[in-house]
C-alpha cells in the first residue's frame, strides 16, 4: 500500500511538472552548465560550499528532455519524503499508521522547487533529510527508544487522505506557483524563437497579451518582422516606442535570451556573441548551455572553425550533448579550411540604441527590407515623422521601385505627413481602401467621435498618433 | 577474489608503466613534419620548464622518443587519444641531461588513416641553460563583454602543472579583480584592484594586507594600471576613464578606449599621492607606466590631442615617453624623452616594459588606441635603448591575431606574452627565449598537462607576470572587498 501511494504521488507529480512546465524545465537546462572538464569543478565552483550547486548542475543537464526533467523534479520531492518517512519509521511506534506524516512536507518541497532554478536548495534539503535519516538510523541502532503519538494521529484513513491532499496541493502549486506560468509562457516563446517558428509565436500570443505584456510583445514584434508583417500590424500588437523591439538593458534572465535571438535573426554575429556572454551570467558558473549552443551555431554559420570546434568540444564534455555535437560535425568539417565570414560594409559602427543601430544598418544594407521595417516602424513609434520620411524617401526607390506595394502603416503615415506636403501623394501610391479609411477616420475625429474612431481604426498609425 | 586482486595489481602496474613505453615501429614513414599541437618544433625552452606534452589530433595512439644530444638520455612515452603525457620526474632528468643542447623528438602515431602507424620527420626542442622564474601570475577571465560572474587571479608553477587561485571574486561575484602587480618579481608583496561596491586597491606587503581608497587621499576616484617601483616604496599608477564599445560587424567585436588618463605616484610608506602638473592635463592621456630596472625612469604611453576626446577616435595614436625620477625626493625630472613617435612612426604604442638589464624596451603596437588585445593587427615590438634601433622579433608575432601583454623574466632571458593566435578570441600564454646575444627565439605555448586543455578552457589568460615564488595571500584579503 505504501509503495503504491508513493508511486501514485510520484506519477502525479511527474505528470504535473511535465504537463505544466515542458518549456520551463528545458529553460532550466539552457540556463545551467555542467562539464566533466577539470576547469568546471576546479575554477567555476568552490568546494565544499558549492557542492549542492554542483549536484544541481549535474542533474539539470537532463532537463533538456522535459519528460526526464519532470521525472527528476518528482523524484527529488519523493526522495525527500522517503527520507522523512525513514525518520518517522524509526522514531515512532506503530509507524505503518504514520505513513501520512512525511507527505505533510510535500507541498512545501514542491513550492521550494518552483523557485529553485539551480536545484541547489532542493539538493541541500535532500542532503539534510538524508543526513537526518542516517543519524536517526544510527541512534536507533544504539538505543531502542521509540516515541508514541496520540491515537488520533494513527487513524487508518489518514494514510490515504493526507498523501492525496498533499499531492493535490502540490499540483496546485505546480500549476499556479510563483513565477511559474509567466516563466513557462516566455520559455515557450523563447523556444519557438530559437527554432524560428515565427507563425507559431503569432498564434501563441493573444492580441490582448501582446498589448499588455512587454515580454511577449517583443516576441510578437520579432515574429511580425520575420514574417514580413511588421509594417502592417506593428501598432495593432501594441508597438509603443522603438524600445519595444528589444531589451536595451538586462531586465531579468528572461530578457537576455531574447536579445540573442533578436540579433541572430538580424544576422549580426558580434552582438550575438555579446548577448550570449551576458546570457551566460544567469548561470552560476558564468556560462550556460544555451549560450554555448548559440555560440557554436553562430560560429558554424560564420565559418569560424576554431571557435566552433572549441565550443563543440566543451559541450561534448557534458553528458547530454553527444548527439547534438555529432549532428554538427559534418558542418564543422565543411568549414575546416574556410575563411571566417566577417561581414562588414564600410566603417565599423558601434552598437548604441535601437534607432541608431537600425539607421546604420539601413545605410549599409538599403535593400534589406527587414532592417528598413525596423527602422521605419521604430521612427513611427517614436512619433518622429520627419526622420521617418527622410529614410522612407531614401528606401522607397529600392524597396517599392514603382511606388506600389507600400505597407499599410507607411501609407497611413504618408497620408498624415502629406497634410504638410501634399506633393508626397504624387510620388507614392496610396491604396484606395486606405484613402477611404483615412477619410472616414478624419471625418469621425472632426465630428468629435474620437473614441469610436479609435475603436474602429485600432491598430492604425492614425490611432497611435492621436 | 584472488583473481580480482591480481587484476587490480596488474592494472595498476600497467597504469604505472603506461607513461614510459618500449618503442614500437610504425609501418609507414611520412616525409613531413609531425603535426603536433602545440607546435614545439624548433622552440627553445628553459631547462626547468614543465613537461612539453603535445598531441596529434585524430590519432588513437601516439608515441614519442626524446633523445638528449648530450648524455644520450632516451625517454620513450606512449599515449592514448593522440596525447603524450610525459612523466614529470623523467622529464626533469631529461632536461638536465640536455641543458644547453637539444632534444631530438621522434613521433609516430596510429589512426584510422594509418592503422599500422606512421612516423614523422624528427624535430628538435632546444634546451637553454637559462632557467625561467618558477611561477607566473595571471588573471583568468572570459574574453571581454561588460560583466562577469566568476574571475580570479591565479598562479602557475612553470616547472610543473600546478595552478592555484591567489584570490577570486567568489565571495562577491559582481567584483572585478584586475591589474595585479608585484615589486621586482617578489611574491611576498602584491597589489591588485577590486572594482565595485566596497572595492579599492588591495596591497599586500610586509605581511600586512590592506585596502587603499584613493578617493580619500587624492583627487583620483580610482587608479588603474600599476608599476611598482623596484625599491618597493612607490607604485606609479595611471588613472584612466575607460569606455568600452561594441561593433555590430567585422572581425573586431570590441574597442576599449580612454577619454582621460593621468599619472600619479603612490608612496606606500607615507600613504600619499604625488602628482606632477605635466601629467594631469586633459589634453594629454598618459597611461601604462613602467619603471626602468634602476628605478630612475618612468616609461609610459601618451596621446596628445588638441581637443578632449569624448568618443572613440581611430587616430588615437599613443607615443612612448619616459621621464626621469628621483626616488629619494619622490619627484619627476624635467626632461621627457620620446622613444616612439606615433605621428612619425605610425600606429599606437602600449605596455612599455623594460628588460631587467635596462637595455631593451618591449611594447605592443597596434593601428590605433590603447587596448591592443582586441586588435588583430597588434604585435610585439622591441627597441634597443642603447642604439635606439628596432630589434627584429622574428617569429614572436602572429600576423593575423593579437599579440599583446608581455613581461620579462627576472633574468631578462625569457618573455611571456598573451596571444590570440589559436582562435582569435581566447588569450593563451606564450614564452619566448631572448638569449644573451639579444637574439629572439621561436616562442612556445605554455605547456599544459593535457594539450587539449588549451582548447577546453573557457577563460582567457590575462596580464601574465613572472614571480619568484608562490603567492600566499591571506584569506582576509577577500574580506577587504566583500560586500555585506
Image: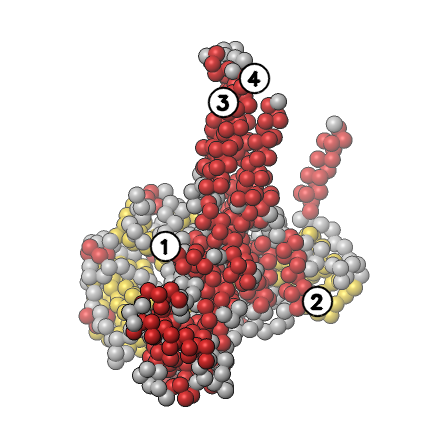
Disc 2: CA contacts within 10 A as few (<14), some (14-19) or many (>=20): some
Callout 2 and callout 4 share a chain: no
Name the subunit of mark 4. Answer: A
Residue depicted at x 59% and y 74%: A339
Q: Secondary structure at mark 3?
A: helix
Chain at tag 3: A
Question: Residue sitting at 32 percent across and 44 percent down?
Answer: B479
User: Where is residue A279 shown, x and y percent of the image?
Assistant: 46, 56
Give the labeled residue for mark 3: A101
Q: Is residue B77 above or below residue B262?
A: above
Near mark 4 (Cα within 10 A), the count class, few <14, some 14-19 or many ≥20, is some
Tell me which chain the residue with mark 2 is part of. Answer: B
Does any portion of residue B269 appear in the rendered image?
A: yes
Looking at the rendered image, the quarter that the C terminus of chain A falls into is bottom left
State the SS at label 1.
Answer: strand
Mark 2 or mark 1: which comes first in sequence? 2
Q: Which mark is residue B77?
A: none
| Residues packed near mark 3 inside 10 Å, few (<14), some (14 to 19) or many (20 plus) | some
In the displayed structure, B451 sits above or below A20; it is below
Front tag of 2 and 1: 1
Q: At 33% from the left edge and 86% from the top edge, which residue is drawn?
A: A421
> Is residue A36 something that shows in the picture?
no
In the picture of the structure, the residue carrying the numbered disc 4 is A96
Q: CA distance from mark 3 to mark 4?
A: 10 Å
Query: Circle 1 sits on which residue?
Result: B176
Amino acid at each position: 500500500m505504501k509503495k503504491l501511494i508513493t508511486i501514485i504521488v510520484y506519477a502525479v507529480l511527474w505528470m504535473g511538472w511535465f504537463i505544466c512546465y515542458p518549456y520551463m524545465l528545458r529553460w532550466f537546462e539552457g540556463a545551467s552548465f555542467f562539464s566533466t572538464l577539470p576547469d568546471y569543478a576546479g575554477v567555476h565552483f568552490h568546494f565544499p560550499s558549492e557542492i549542492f550547486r554542483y549536484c544541481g548542475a549535474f542533474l539539470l543537464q537532463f532537463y533538456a528532455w522535459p519528460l526526464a526533467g519532470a521525472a527528476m523534479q518528482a523524484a527529488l520531492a519523493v526522495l525527500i519524503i522517503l527520507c522523512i518517512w525513514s525518520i518517522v519509521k524509526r522514531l515512532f511506534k506503530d509507524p505503518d499508521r504514520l505513513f501520512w506524516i512525511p507527505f505533510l512536507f510535500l507541498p512545501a518541497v514542491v513550492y521550494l522547487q518552483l523557485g529553485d532554478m539551480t536545484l541547489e536548495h532542493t539538493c541541500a534539503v535532500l542532503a539534510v533529510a538524508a543526513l537526518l535519516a542516517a543519524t536517526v538510523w544510527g541512534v536507533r541502532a544504539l538505543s531502542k527508544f521509540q516515541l508514541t503519538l496520540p491515537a488520533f494521529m494513527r487513524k487508518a484513513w489518514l494514510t490515504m487522505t493526507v498523501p492525496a491532499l498533499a499531492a493535490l496541493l502540490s499540483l496546485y502549486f505546480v500549476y499556479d506557483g510563483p513565477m511559474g506560468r509567466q516563466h513557462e509562457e516566455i520559455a515557450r516563446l523563447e523556444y519557438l524563437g530559437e527554432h524560428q517558428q515565427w507563425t507559431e509565436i503569432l498564434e501563441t500570443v493573444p492580441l490582448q497579451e501582446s498589448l499588455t505584456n512587454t515580454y511577449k510583445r517583443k516576441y510578437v514584434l520579432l515574429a511580425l518582422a520575420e514574417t514580413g508583417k511588421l509594417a502592417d500590424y506593428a501598432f495593432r500588437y501594441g508597438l509603443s516606442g522603438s524600445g519595444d523591439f528589444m531589451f536595451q538593458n538586462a531586465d531579468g534572465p528572461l530578457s537576455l535570451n531574447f536579445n540573442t535571438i533578436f540579433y541572430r535573426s538580424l544576422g549580426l554575429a558580434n552582438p550575438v556573441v555579446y548577448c550570449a556572454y551576458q546570457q551566460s551570467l544567469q548561470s552560476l558558473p558564468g556560462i550556460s548551455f544555451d549560450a554555448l549552443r548559440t555560440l557554436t551555431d553562430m560560429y558554424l554559420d560564420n565559418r569560424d572553425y576554431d571557435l566552433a570546434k572549441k565550443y563543440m568540444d566543451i559541450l561534448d564534455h557534458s553528458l547530454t550533448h553527444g548527439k547534438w555535437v555529432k549532428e554538427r560535425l559534418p558542418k564543422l568539417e565543411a568549414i575546416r579550411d574556410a575563411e571566417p565570414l566577417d561581414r562588414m560594409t564600410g566603417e565599423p559602427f558601434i552598437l548604441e540604441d535601437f534607432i541608431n543601430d537600425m539607421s546604420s544598418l539601413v545605410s549599409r544594407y538599403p535593400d534589406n527590407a527587414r532592417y528598413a521595417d525596423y527602422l521605419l516602424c521604430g521612427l513611427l513609434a517614436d512619433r518622429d515623422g520627419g526622420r521617418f520620411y527622410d529614410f522612407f524617401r531614401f528606401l522607397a526607390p529600392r524597396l517599392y521601385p514603382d511606388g506600389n506595394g507600400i505597407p499599410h502603416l507607411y501609407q497611413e503615415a504618408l497620408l498624415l505627413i502629406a497634410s504638410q506636403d501634399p506633393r508626397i501623394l504624387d510620388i507614392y501610391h496610396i491604396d484606395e481602401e486606405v484613402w477611404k479609411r483615412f477619410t472616414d477616420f478624419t471625418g469621425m475625429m472632426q465630428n468629435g467621435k474620437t473614441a469610436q474612431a479609435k475603436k474602429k481604426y485600432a491598430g492604425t498609425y492614425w490611432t497611435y498618433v492621436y | 577474489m584472488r583473481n580480482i586482486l591480481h587484476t587490480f595489481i596488474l592494472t595498476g602496474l600497467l597504469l604505472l608503466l603506461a607513461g614510459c613505453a618500449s618503442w614500437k615501429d610504425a609501418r609507414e614513414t611520412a616525409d613531413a613534419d609531425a603535426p603536433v599541437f602545440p607546435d614545439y618544433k624548433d622552440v627553445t625552452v628553459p631547462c626547468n620548464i614543465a613537461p612539453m606534452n603535445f598531441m596529434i589530433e585524430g590519432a588513437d595512439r601516439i608515441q614519442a622518443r626524446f633523445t638528449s644530444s648530450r648524455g644520450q638520455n632516451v625517454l620513450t612515452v606512449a599515449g592514448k587519444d593522440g596525447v603524450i603525457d610525459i612523466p614529470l620526474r623523467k622529464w626533469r632528468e631529461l632536461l638536465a641531461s640536455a641543458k644547453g643542447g637539444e632534444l631530438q623528438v621522434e613521433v609516430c602515431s596510429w589512426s584510422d588513416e594509418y592503422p599500422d602507424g606512421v612516423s614523422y620527420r624528427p624535430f628538435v626542442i632546444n634546451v637553454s641553460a637559462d632557467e625561467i622564474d618558477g611561477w607566473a601570475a595571471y588573471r583568468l577571465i572570459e574574453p571581454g563583454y561588460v560583466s562577469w560572474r566568476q574571475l580570479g587571479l591565479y598562479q602557475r608553477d612553470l616547472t610543473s602543472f600546478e595552478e592555484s587561485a591567489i584570490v577570486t571574486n567568489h565571495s562577491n561575484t559582481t567584483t572585478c579583480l584586475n591589474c595585479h602587480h608585484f615589486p621586482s618579481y617578489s611574491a611576498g608583496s602584491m597589489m591588485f584592484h577590486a572594482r565595485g561596491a566596497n572595492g579599492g586597491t588591495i596591497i599586500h606587503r610586509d605581511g600586512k594586507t590592506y585596502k587603499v581608497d584613493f578617493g580619500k587621499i587624492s583627487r583620483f576616484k580610482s587608479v588603474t594600471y600599476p608599476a611598482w617601483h623596484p625599491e618597493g616604496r612607490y607604485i606609479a599608477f595611471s588613472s584612466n576613464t575607460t569606455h568600452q564599445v561594441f561593433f555590430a560587424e567585422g572581425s573586431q567585436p570590441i574597442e576599449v578606449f580612454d577619454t582621460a588618463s593621468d599619472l600619479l605616484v603612490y608612496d606606500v610608506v607615507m600613504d600619499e599621492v604625488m602628482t606632477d602638473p605635466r601629467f594631469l592635463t586633459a589634453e594629454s592621456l598618459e597611461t601604462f607606466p613602467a619603471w626602468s630596472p634602476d628605478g630612475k625612469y618612468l616609461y609610459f604611453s601618451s596621446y596628445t590631442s588638441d581637443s578632449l576626446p569624448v568618443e572613440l577616435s581611430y587616430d588615437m595614436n599613443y607615443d612612448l615617453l619616459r621621464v626621469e625620477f628621483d626616488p629619494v625626493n619622490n619627484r619627476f625630472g624635467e626632461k621627457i624623452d620620446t622613444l616612439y613617435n606615433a605621428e612619425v612612426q605610425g600606429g599606437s604604442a602600449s605596455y612599455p616594459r623594460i628588460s631587467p638589464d635596462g637595455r631593451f624596451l618591449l611594447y605592443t603596437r597596434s593601428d590605433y588606441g590603447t587596448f591592443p588585445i582586441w586588435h588583430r593587427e597588434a604585435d610585439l615590438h622591441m627597441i634597443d635603448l642603447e642604439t635606439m634601433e628596432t630589434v627584429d622579433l622574428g617569429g614572436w608575432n602572429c600576423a593575423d591575431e593579437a599579440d599583446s601583454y608581455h613581461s620579462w623574466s627576472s633574468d631578462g632571458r625569457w618573455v611571456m606574452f598573451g596571444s590570440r593566435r589559436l582562435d582569435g578570441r581566447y588569450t593563451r600564454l606564450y614564452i619566448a627565449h631572448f638569449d644573451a646575444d639579444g637574439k629572439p627565439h621561436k616562442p612556445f605555448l605554455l605547456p599544459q598537462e593535457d594539450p587539449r586543455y588549451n582548447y577546453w578552457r573557457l577563460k582567457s589568460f590575462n596580464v601574465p607576470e613572472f614571480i619568484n615564488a608562490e603567492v600566499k595571500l591571506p584569506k582576509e584579503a577577500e574580506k577587504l572587498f566583500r560586500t555585506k
